[in-house]
Image: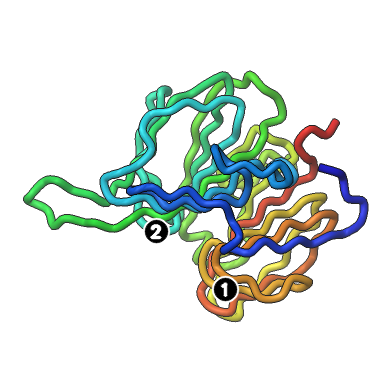
Amino acid sequence: MSTLTTPHIDIHRAGDRMKTRIAWLDSKHSFSFGSNYDPENTHHGLLLVNNDDVVAPGQGFETHPHRDMEIVTWVLEGSLVHQDSLGHSGVVYPGLAQRMSAGTGILHSEKNDSWRADPRFTAHDEPVHFVQMWVVPDEPGLTPGYEQCEIDDELARGGLITVASGMPRHREHAAIALNSSHAALHVARLAPEQTVELPNALYLHVFVARGEVTMEGAGPLDEGDAVRATRTGGQRITALRPSEVLIWEMHARLGAG
């Protein structure tokens, strides 16, 4: 992929994403993933994966390996049980920031937690809807790690909240850390007519996880739409209805340097 030297905005519509659909999973891929491969659509900046997943009750991803990747999971609805080979076990739910650093290698599973088999309880059969994002760490071979943090109160106040970052200027107020000094994930949970301003960055990836917004220079964006921007910033995003927007700010790209 060539490096752009002038400001550029590229809009990617929800319906154009590659898809994986099986009995228990509805997954939409913003970039090439697994058997869905397009050599012209492999990443943007340092972001390699932006999967929009819906998992059926009582189902999920069995134990599988990862290495040399920073993996951030953001739940929109429902709950997701995480277990890994480091001994971490917990439930990820809306408003909880979670990061797993695969480093030299880690095994983990992710399951929909909404199903209950115990007859003493009312059965829940809700799917879990989440976005999983992968960015490249500064260097390979790091020690695997895990971090999570509850930030629902911060999101409720509005504005652009820094969820995960490895950038020095975000260290004091990012909810969780990344082993990537050129990347940060910001989230905005917006009521209708609320507005946030995009940071200036070499690369921006704006994903409308829920709702509908309008963005200066891009126009209306529906749920599942994304904007890939290069050498831009300062554009305002305004919610047209209750919305949640995930924004990656990146100052390097895959393979640079």
Q: For the residue marked with disc 1, what is the amino acid?
A: Glu
Q: How many labels does the image show?
A: 2
Which residue shows up at 73% across the image and 56% down it?
228
Give the quarter of the figure containing the C terminus. top right
Q: For the residue marked with disc 2, what is the amino acid?
A: Glu
Q: What element carries label 2?
A: strand
Q: Please state the horizontal and vertical placement of residue 255, each as a whole percent of the image.
A: 79, 32
Q: Is residue 64 above or below residue 71?
A: above
Q: Please state the horizontal and vertical placement of residue 38, each as a whole percent of the image.
A: 66, 44
Q: In this view, does 103 lie above or below 191?
A: above
The residue singled out by tag 2 in the image is 77
- Is 82 placed left or right of 10 in the picture? left
Give the quarter of the figure containing the N terminus. top right
Label 1 neighbour load within 10 Å: few <14, some 14-19, many 20+ = many
Q: What element carries label 1?
A: strand
Q: Which of 97 and 172 is in front in this view?
A: 97
The residue singled out by tag 1 in the image is 212
Name the image colouring.
rainbow
Q: Is residue 216 above or below residue 164?
A: below
Q: Please state the horizontal and vertical placement of residue 103, each as a whole percent of the image.
A: 58, 24
Which residue shows up at 80% across the image and 57% down it?
200
Which residue shows up at 39% across the image and 58% down it?
77
